[in-house]
Amino acid sequence: MRINTLAAACTLAALAGCASTGPASTGPGSRPAVAGQAKNIIFFLGDGMGVNTLTAARIYHAGEDGALTIDTLPESAFVKTFSNDAQVTDSAASMSAYMTGVKQNNGVISMSTETRAISPAADANGNRLVSRCENGKPVPTLAELVKARGMAAGVVTNTNVTDATPAATYAHACTRRLETDIAAALVPGGAGYNKALGANGLDLVFGGGAQFFTPVAQGGKRADGRKLLDELQAKGWRVASDSAQLAALSPAPQPVIGLFGQGHLAFEAARDPQKQPLLSEMTGKAIDILSRNPNGFFLVVEGGLIDHALHATQAKRALQETVSYNAALKLAIDKMQAIDPGLKNTLIVATADHDHTLLINGYSPRTGKTTPANPGILGLVRSIPDGKVRFDKDGAPFTILGFGTGEHRVQGSRKDVKLTDEIAAGDDYHQEAVVRTRAGAETHGGADVYLGAIGANAELFRGTIDNTRVFSLIKTAAGL
């Protein structure tokens, strides 16, 4: 592997604080990738997409013997996800490990291992005030390293662009709760800008979270009164706010931000298609724009609503969002095959940041894929070979899918539970849980997650590896 001396210098500078004190790159014109290295890198992250969720989504979408796009990737690994201080990670620590190669404490965004946050206070409007770090400093991210090479870099998500997973790509923060500060890290030249992204910053940002770019007086969350979208436009950025404006964006090198909701976007099956684009539509447009850079590009695509549905114990929504994530992955592979036949210069990695507590209960007959006439894996457990509904010890039916933790837990005996396939397969049904939590507070799980890879140097991803190792392997694959 050839050593990128510019990126190495940035790494050393960042460890000394370059992420907050000065630019880490010389901008466009830096050394491009050489033969055998990945010129283009696309990192797909299914937030909370554990193995049970993947398996259930495969059955939901294509039946037991079917396949999702991620199943077809030729190289694979399992990833250990524990964080620096917890057996079960949160999204901030896990995505930061992917982006920096450094183990993080839960809640911390791309900082050194010892970083701990003091929970931020709130003002009278409920806006989070600045927190301070304990013994922490920024560490360089993949986005910063590729910008140092002169590559383009972008982030696509269906959550807030300031949420933990996308934030770990481009920002450094003691706590993920500081979303107004994280938004400011995107604005070149402004207060709080992450100078390690170079003079011009990221090239593309698509997702939700407009409230964190908007002052309180205009219905947003910014107590400082700054209008970040106006600031970005003044620096030459294009701005899109609905599906039509996204579609109309030309593949010009001019930077662009698309914010398609005040907060997180709606579940795909429940969204207004005029206002909020599909994850695959945002991904396709991002590739069209970023691929114009002759030095290549780095793109992070997050299917963040998988996690939201699982926290709410809404299995159907989680499976639909996993299918949406896989549709975006398929589109990206197809587009890059057209741009770079054989993916000789392109590496695509698809994985998750952590597991959840989704369970697949036995021993039901094979259901095949879910259709309007067939609840499939969303339905009740039945017996083999007669297909009759099975009952628990209390004489009540139960579903194939359940959760270890969640809001829907029957108190005492289940003998009076009235449950049908139609109820269980409803759009917003909350599966039952073993341990009761408050609404929306189903927990992450600690199991390893699956990783698939295709393209240039994809064979590096094998075996069981730590999440920090993924960072190192991407660097090796691209010669960063």
Image (cartoon, grey):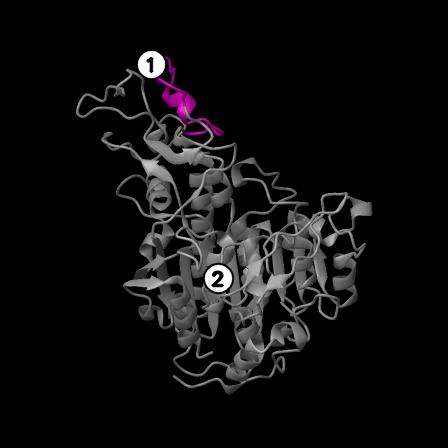
Q: Which mark is residue 6?
A: none
Q: Nearer the viewer, mark 2 or mark 1?
A: 2
How far separated are the C-alphas under marks 2 and 1?
Answer: 46 Å
Amino acid bearing label 1: Lys
For the residue pair 423 and 251, the one nearer the viewer reads as 423
Q: Earlier in the sequence, mark 2 or mark 1?
A: 2
Task: Tell me if 400 is positioned left or right of 236 in this view.
Answer: left
Element assignment for label 1: loop
Q: Residues within 10 Å of mark 2 (few under 14, many from 20)?
A: many
Q: Is residue 263 above or below residue 29?
A: above
Q: Residues within 10 Å of mark 1 (few under 14, many from 20)?
A: some
Task: Tell me if 188 is positioned left or right of 418 in this view.
Answer: right
Q: Position of residue 413 (x, y in %)?
A: 35, 17
Dominant SS of magenta comes to loop
Q: How many marks?
A: 2
Q: Is residue 133 above or below residue 363?
A: below
Q: Residue at x 47, y 44 (%)?
A: 306
Residue of label 1: 415
Indicate whether residue 427 is drawn in magenta: yes
For the residue pair 336 and 429, the one nearer the viewer reads as 429
For the residue pair 22 and 71, the one nearer the viewer reads as 22
Q: Residue at x 22, y 31 (%)?
A: 363
Q: Is residue 400 visible?
A: yes
Numbered range of the magenta stretch = 410-431
Indicate whether residue 129 is drawn in magenta: no
Element assignment for label 2: loop
Residue of label 2: 104
Amino acid bearing label 2: Gln
Q: Quadrant of the N terminus?
A: bottom left
Q: Is residue 221 above or below residue 463?
A: above
Q: Position of residue 167 (x, y in %)?
A: 58, 59
